[in-house]
């Protein structure tokens, strides 16, 4: 099990790199995360939801994503509450306080999924969540040491030197852990190092002296990891600095599946700007994309609080284009109705009025892979997935954006400058992205799928060089 001294230390990336490295060594590898909290979800072949990071790790291991790779997924809806997904399906909603009491009830399902993966693997790589040093959460824990104890797993802990204080974070983790949890840790990794490694040798020796844990590697920062999807909204950033075509994306409070936009951000001639709350949408944007949302009505109210609805209206008056993805598509319509409160507080809300459509929320969630769809304007083929509540109808649906087999999806304004779709992941399709950008006079220069594979291979090469993978494997086999 790979745990970390905190969130964002690189656990997901390390597991992906280890998965690719050990797969290339001929092992059957399965990734696993007992509990994840993220609004970036992937859809498995059977229509279940898992964290996007586990889907990437499955790709690294060259296996199909499974609901068992992330048996508990928490999708935050407010600062204090989340939807709970267990083995791919929603079982309802809970406040943070209620979930803290209930989570131990989910341990049997978590262990069931882990055992399922074990049967098909030589090696299961388990990713922790947050940090085991959060001892206030240790009671009933199923994400870190609670799961490690239940499954009897050895643990490797990772620290992030790039953020500073890595000696204190590792030594402090050692200090606060209970003896039985501390003894599960069999070594440490230092991640994201920059500079001359010889200058940190004394630091490594100090950590080992204080903790008695052996060092398993000092891993330099690898720029290629920027080409892999980020999972946490804290990772939102300006993705490129080109100037030929600017895309502005409002960073909604409950933004979801923002990895939809990663391929655009990696295009050399595209400038992708995530606009933080308190800032206006840039007036020189060529396109505004309204991303997915875990709380569409709440995020539409949030959008108005920021004054972004005024910016979007001005953008359209200037001749700009707007694209809505999933929840963003729903926001573009005339109204959203949620009489049963499945998306939050019961009621209805006026949309932005840029598409002549209306959305009615329903309790049943649509989660399905889209194996093949056609972009109506260009004829380009698309693959992706749907994951949404509600259905949208109206006059502009007569001009769908996509055809999913024989089923129309999305809507287009009469002048063609405002569009929306429920399909996520469409920009990962190189042929579609090329033709779509060509409509704006931009030449695509990115082979996204090939670049993703190259990044995973580069990460595996990097870990082979800078981490003691033989020792890691020996620790895994000590169980």
Image (cartoon, rainbow, N blue to C red):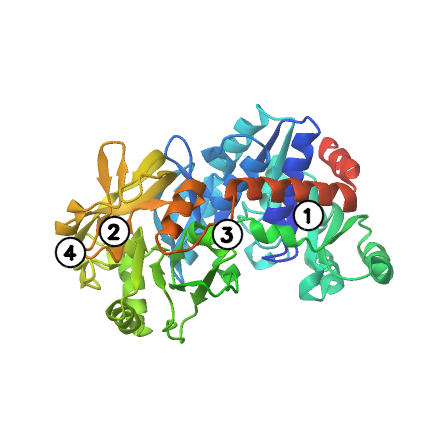
On the question of residue 51 being in view, the answer is yes
For label 4, count other residues whose C-alpha is less than 10 Å away and answer few (under 14), some (14-19) or many (20+): many
Separation of marks 4 and 3 at Cα, in angstroms: 33 Å
In the rendered structure, which disc, 4 or 2, sits on the residue that comes first in sequence?
Answer: 2
Picture disc at residue 342: 2
Residue ID at (26%, 38%): 403
In the rendered structure, which disc, 4 or 3, sits on the residue that comes first in sequence?
Answer: 3
As helix, strand or loop, the secondary structure at mark 4 comes to loop
Q: Is residue 265 left or right of residue 165?
A: left
Percent coordinates x, y for residue 234 in the rendering: 51, 61
Residue ID at (47%, 62%): 271
Which quarter shows the C terminus? top right
As helix, strand or loop, the secondary structure at mark 2 comes to loop
Mark 3 highlights which residue?
231
Mark 4 highlights which residue?
356
In the rendered structure, which disc, 2 or 3, sits on the residue that comes first in sequence?
Answer: 3
As helix, strand or loop, the secondary structure at mark 3 comes to loop
In the rendered structure, which disc, 3 or 1, sits on the residue that comes first in sequence?
Answer: 1
Mark 1 highlights which residue?
181
Separation of marks 3 and 1 at Cα, in angstroms: 27 Å
């Amino acid at each position: 099990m790979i745990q970390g001294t905190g969130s964002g230390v690189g656990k997901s990336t390390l597991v992906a790199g280890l998965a690719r490295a050990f797969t290339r060594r001929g092992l059957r590898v399965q990734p696993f995360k007992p509990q994840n909290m993220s609004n970036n979800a992937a859809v498995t072949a059977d229509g279940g939801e898992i964290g996007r990071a586990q889907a990437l790790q499955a790709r690294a291991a060259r296996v199909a994503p499974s609901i068992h790779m992330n048996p508990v997924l928490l999708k935050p809806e407010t600062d204090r509450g989340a939807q709970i997904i267990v083995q791919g399906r929603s079982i309802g909603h809970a406040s943070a306080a209620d979930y803290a009491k209930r989570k131990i009830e989910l341990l049997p399902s978590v262990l069931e999924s882990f055992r399922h993966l074990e049967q098909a693997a030589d090696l299961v790589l388990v990713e922790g969540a947050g940090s085991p040093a959060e001892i206030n959460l240790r009671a009933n824990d199923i994400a870190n040491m609670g799961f490690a104890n239940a499954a009897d797993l050895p643990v490797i802990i990772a620290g992030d030197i790039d953020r500073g204080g890595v000696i204190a974070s590792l030594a402090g983790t050692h200090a606060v852990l209970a003896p039985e949890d501390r003894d599960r840790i069999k070594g440490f990794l230092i991640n994201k190092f920059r500079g001359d490694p010889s200058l940190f040798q004394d630091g490594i020796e100090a950590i080992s002296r204080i903790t008695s844990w052996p060092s398993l590697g000092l891993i330099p920062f690898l720029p290629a990891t920027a080409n892999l999807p980020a999972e946490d909204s804290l990772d939102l950033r300006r993705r490129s600095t080109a100037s030929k075509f600017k895309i502005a994306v409002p960073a909604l409070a409950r933004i979801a599946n923002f990895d939809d936009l990663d391929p655009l951000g990696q295009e050399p001639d595209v400038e992708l700007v995530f606009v933080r709350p308190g800032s206006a949408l840039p007036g020189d944007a060529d396109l505004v994309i309204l991303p997915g949302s875990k709380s569409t009505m709440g995020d539409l109210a949030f959008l108005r609080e920021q004054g972004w609805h005024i910016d979007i209206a001005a953008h359209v008056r200037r001749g700009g284009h707007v694209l809505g993805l999933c929840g963003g598509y729903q926001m573009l319509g005339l109204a959203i109705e949620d009489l049963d409160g499945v998306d939050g507080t019961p009621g209805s809300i006026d949309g932005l009025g840029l598409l002549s459509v209306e959305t009615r929320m329903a309790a049943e969630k649509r989660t399905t892979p889209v194996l093949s769809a056609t972009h109506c304007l260009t004829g380009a083929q698309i693959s992706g997935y749907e994951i949404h509540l509600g259905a949208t109808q109206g006059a502009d649906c007569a001009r769908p954006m996509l055809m999913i087999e024989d089923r129309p999806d999305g809507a287009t304004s009469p002048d063609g400058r405002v569009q929306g779709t429920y399909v996520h992941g469409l920009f990962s399709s190189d042929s579609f992205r090329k033709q779509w950008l060509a409509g704006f006079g931009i030449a695509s220069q990115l082979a996204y799928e090939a670049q993703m594979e190259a990044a995973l291979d580069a990460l595996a090469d990097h870990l082979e060089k800078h981490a003691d993978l033989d020792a890691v494997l020996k620790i895994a086999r000590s169980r």
